[in-house]
Amino acid sequence: MIQAKNMFAKLFDKINNKHFLSLAGNGVMAGLAMLTLAILFRVLTKVDIGYWFFYQTLFVLLDTFRSGFLQMALISFYSGTEETTSKKVIGSIWYIAIIITFLFVGINLIIYPFSKFFNDPAIILTIKWFGITFLATLPSNIASWIMQADQRFDRLLILRVLNQGSFIIGVLICVFINTINLQNLFLLNFVVNLLGSIVTIFLGWTKINWIVFRTGEYVKKIYHYGKYSVGASVSTSLLRSSDTFIITYLLGPSALAIYNIPVRLMEFIEIPLRSMVSTGMASIAKAYNRNNLKEVGYILQKYAGTLSVAFIPIAILAISLADIGVGLLGGGKYLGTEAANFYRISMIFAIFYPIDRFIGVSLDVIQQPRINFIKVLLMSLMNIVGDFAGILIFGNIYGVALGTLFPLCIGVFFGYYHLSKYVNFKLSNIFIFGYIQVRRILRKNVKYFKK
């Protein structure tokens, strides 16, 4: 009995840290999202699923303007600072966020009366639901940025479980009472986001009362920082969403539904990647704010290398089980399509995602958002060219998968060339650091549980 208690105590010690909580938050959110999608794939037609993905892609792209303008600025100026500075930063963030939000809502209200002149149902639904949903997400978004900067991944886990859990419960209820359709799906999405924002305000996680501490100095600082970071974020979102728009235009919504299955399965890579970026970003920001550039380089190489090395066996496993993954998520009607091979190609390239992601994050954190903006813009342009060329050559979504190699290479080498001017690190050291770190983690955990 005592031995069992000691084992549970050791296990709790291992999981009660920022890395595990960040991973758990992303994992729970992704797991529930994939379960929701598995249900939607089975109860909606390919065309309706295509419309839903189109709206989600466009919403994320437009929402990226707000998050891209403010999220990295909050982390860069807020992490590791004293309370007086923290209040000025958060107050200024809230001030700018409100302006951006009401600007977008105002534009939506102006366009809304003209929605009847559009023939595309996806556009009509987007115009109808974007504004109120964008407004509803504001408090919970800012709360999540603050939690990330404070490394309060326990709170972030609660918020993500609340949002995604409420959504899947709502979907199941609609399926059970046979009312699942696009209109109810959009309504449910709005209600869930509103609920999350109300909870974060009630619990004081948004720090909205700090808006009174905003200053003109920090509003200007955040603006000048944000005008480049938003360019990088929008370009990153465009890098991902351009596939959606081009596939819809050239191949149709059914092809988009097939494409989204491997994209969603890529969450097995994105979950640990987002988690490590969340924890690593705040650590890099603290090191930079303390003027420790050597530590910045070390953290970058350690995090990026650890993930890249760890992704190799994950990629091999995913490639082997691709058909099973497609069948579980999409159902039998997607077996035999291009989905499984698209997933295999994507998993090979995914090994290098951490290097590109951490180089970009580091450029933002050391307050070089202009360079990161140029980097991501070049990647986006190359991705668009690659998508059109690939689809015209292959005639299917394989062209999109193969076309991702070129923007990835541009991102890694362009980013490395410019970041190495400020931070001392080498690309070759990333895999060396990763191998050493993975081996150290494995040995440490084996010894820990043998005691």
Image (cartoon, helix red, strand yellow):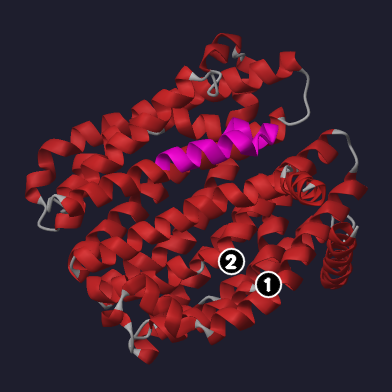
Relative placement, left or right, of 280 versus 399 is right
SS at badge 2: helix
Q: Quadrant of residue 272?
A: bottom right
Characterize the magenta stretch by its predominant secondary structure. helix
Can the viewer see residue 99?
no
Q: Earlier in the sequence, mark 1 or mark 2?
A: 2
Q: As rendered, which of 11 and 433 lies closer to the eye?
A: 11
> Which numbered marker is on residue 311?
1
Q: Quadrant of the C terminus?
A: bottom right
Residue 247 lies, in percent from the top left, at 32, 73
**Pointer 2: residues within 10 angstroms few (<14), some, or many (20+)?**
some
Give the residue drawn at x 28%, y 35%. Answer: 191
Residue 42 lies, in percent from the top left, at 24, 68
Distance between the alpha carbons at the discs numbered 1 and 2: 7 Å
Residue 68 lies, in percent from the top left, at 53, 42
Residue 277 magenta: no
Residue 441 lies, in percent from the top left, at 84, 62
The three-letter amino acid code for the residue at tag 1 is Phe
Task: Give the residue at mark 2.
Answer: 269
146 w.r.t. 439: above or below: above
Give the residue drawn at x 26%, y 51%. Answer: 172
SS at badge 1: helix
Tell me the magenta residue range.
Answer: 145-163
Of all residues, the one furthest to the top in this rendering is 212
Q: Are marks 1 and 2 in contact (CB under 8 Å)?
A: yes
The three-letter amino acid code for the residue at tag 2 is Ile
